[in-house]
Amino acid sequence: MKRLLSFAAAFAIGLSTITAVSAAPKKEFNIAWTIYVGWMPWPYAAETGIVKKWADKYGITINVTQINDYVESINQYTAGKFDGVTVTNMDALTIPAAGGVDTTAIIMGDYSNGNDGVVLKKGKTLADIKGQKINLVELSVSHYLLARGLSTVKLQEKDIKTVNTSDADIVAAAKSPDTTAVVTWNPQLLEVKSEPGATLVFDSSKIPGEIEDLLVINTETLKDNPNLAKALVGIWYETIALMKDESDKGKAAREAMAKLSGTNLAGFETQLKTTYMYYTPKDGAAFMTGPELPKIMDQVRGFCFEHNLLGEKVKSKDAVGIMTPTKALGSAKNVKLRFDASYMTLAAEGKL
Amino acid sequence: MNIAPARGSRIVLAAIPFFLIVMVYIIGSAERRAANPEDKLLPPISEMADATKRLATEPDRRSGDYVLWTDTAASLQRLLLGLGISTLIGLGFGLTVGLLPIAGASFGTIVAVISMIPPMAVLPILFIVFGLGELSKVMLIIIGVAPCLIRDMSIEVQSLPREQMIKAQTLGASTWQVAIRVVLPQIMPRLIKSVRLMLGPAFLFLISAEAIAADVGLGYRIFLVRRYLSMDVILPYVAWITLLAFLLDLLLGLFARKIFPWAYVEELR
C-alpha cells in the first residue's frame, strides 16, 4: 500500500510540474492566437519571418501557435501552457485574471467597430427583441453587447430568453426556421445578416472601444523577460504597417492574411472596415493611457460580476483588481489584470 | 486464471484504482494551489463539494431554479426519449430486415451505409430540418444509435437456427407468428445488451447536442461554465453523468437477468 501511495505521489508531482507555470528566465516563448480579423497579423508575421527577425534581435525564440477554439486558447494560457494569447478585454478579465493568473495587456490591437452585432429575423428595431429567444454564445462578448444594447432600449435581460449556441454552429442555427434572433461576431455575422429578412439592429460601433482585442502576456514572465514584450511589440507594428499599406505589397499581405483566416481579400477587407485598428503604437498607447479605458473596464467588470463570471463566491465587482496606466479599479491587493502602455510607447519613440 | 478473489478482497481490489485516482488528484490539486491560490484548473474536493451543494440545494440567483436538478431532468428526458425511440426502431426494423429476405434485400445495405455516417458531421442539416429545440437533440441520439441497433438486431435474427423457423412453419405458424413467438423472445436479451453498450454513445451525442445549442441540460452547463474555466462545477458534473450512466447500465443489466434468466445461465458468477 505504501509503495502504491508513493507511486501515486510521484505521479502527481510529475503531473503538476508539467502543468505548473515556470517563471524562471527562459529563452523560448509560446504565443497562442485564434482566427479573428484583428489577430491575423500574427500568423502572417510568423510565416514571413518577421517573428524570427525580432526574436533573433533579442536573442529569444518565439513560437506562434494557432488554436482552433478561442476559449480553449485562453484556457490553455490560463493553465500555463502559453506565455501569451490574443484575447478580448472581457475574457482577459474573466478567465485568466479571475483565475488568479496575473496578466498584462501590452498591445492594444483594435476595438470592434461593428464586428459584433445583434440580428433579428422578426423585427426591425432593437426594441422588437422583447420576448424573443436569442441564440448567442452566452457569457461572451456577444452577451455583453446584448446587455449593453438592451439597456439602450430600457429592456432587461429577463425580458428575453437566451439560448447558448456554439459559435461554430451559429450560422446553421440562424438558418433554422425557429431561430428569430442571433448575436454573433464576424465572420459569422456577415453570413447571418445576409439572410433574407434579417436586420442588423445593434452593433458594436454603438459602443466604441468597449470590445477590445488585446495581446496579453503572463505578468511574471513579462517581469523576468521584458525583451519578450519588446520583441512582440516590434513584430506587431511592423506587421500591421504592412497591413495598412495601400501599395501592392500591402495588398499582398492582406491577401495572405485573408487566406490564413479562410476568406478572400474582399471578405477580409469588409471585416477590416468594422474593426477600428490602432495602426500606430502612439495611438494604441494613447488609448491605454486615456481616460476612457477605466470607464470601459468598469462597465465590463460590472457585467462580469452580475453574471457571476468573476467566480461564484465573489461578493463585489472589486474582487479582481484592474490596473490601467491612469487609474486602478477594485482590490489593490489582488491586481490580476494590468494594462501596460510602456512597450507601445517605446515603439512609438523608436527605442526598440 | 484459477485464483479468484473472495468477496471481501474483491471489493478492496475494486476500490484501489478509484482510491489511486483520488489521491493523484488531491496531490496535483494541492501542488497547483501552492503555486497559485486562485487556481481553477484542479480545485480541491472541498470546493467541488461547495459548488455541488450550491447547484443542488440553492436556487439560482437569476432564474430561481435548482440548477443541478433541472439540468438532470432535461438531459434525462432527452436521453430516455432518444434511447427509447431508438430501441423501438432498432427492434422493429432489425427484426423485419433480419427475418424477411425482401426487407433485407431492400433495406440491409442502406441501413449499413447510414450507420456509417458520423452524426456530428450532419449537425447543420439536422438544425435546419428539425430546428434548434428538443427535437433536434433527440434526433441526434436516434440517428447515432438506431442504425447500429438495427444492424445488430438483424444480424442476431439471422444467426438464429434456420431449423427453428422451418419447424414453426411446418407446425402451421404464419410469418407474423414466427416473428412474435419464435424470433422476438430470443433476440430480446441481445437487444438489452446492445442498448447497454449504446448508453455511452447516446450520452456522447446528448452532451454534444447540448453543447451546441441549449438553454438547460448537463452538457449545456458544462460548456457554459467552461467559458470561465469553472472546473469546480465541471468535475462534479462529469462524475454525476458517469454515475447516471452507470446506474442506467446497472438497472438494464438487473432487469435483463430478472426477465430473461435463461440467457444468463452460462454466465460466470
Image (cartoon, coloured by chain):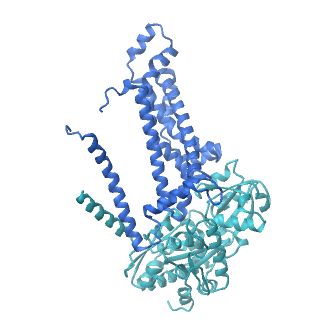
Front-lying residue, A87 or A97: A97
Percent of width and height locating residue B161: 37, 19
Q: Position of residue B175 (x, y in %)?
A: 50, 15
Q: Residue furthest top?
A: B171
**B8 above or below A102?**
above
Q: Residue at x 78, y 66 (%)?
A: A154
Which percent across, then down, holds residue B38? 47, 71
Question: Relative to A341, is A94 above or below?
Answer: above
What residue is rendered at 58% in x and 44% in y?
B137
Quarter holding the C terminus of chain B?
top left
**Residue A206 in view of the camera:** yes
- Among the chains pictured, the one given cyan colouring is A
Residue A217 is left or right of residue A188, and the answer is left
Q: Quadrant of the N terminus of chain B?
A: top left
**Residue A164 occupies which quadrant of the picture?**
bottom right
Residue B104 visible (yes or no): no
Q: Which chain is blue?
A: B
Quarter of the image where one finds residue A257: bottom right
Task: Please tell me which residue is depicted at 19% across the width and 37% down the height of the picture.
Answer: B2
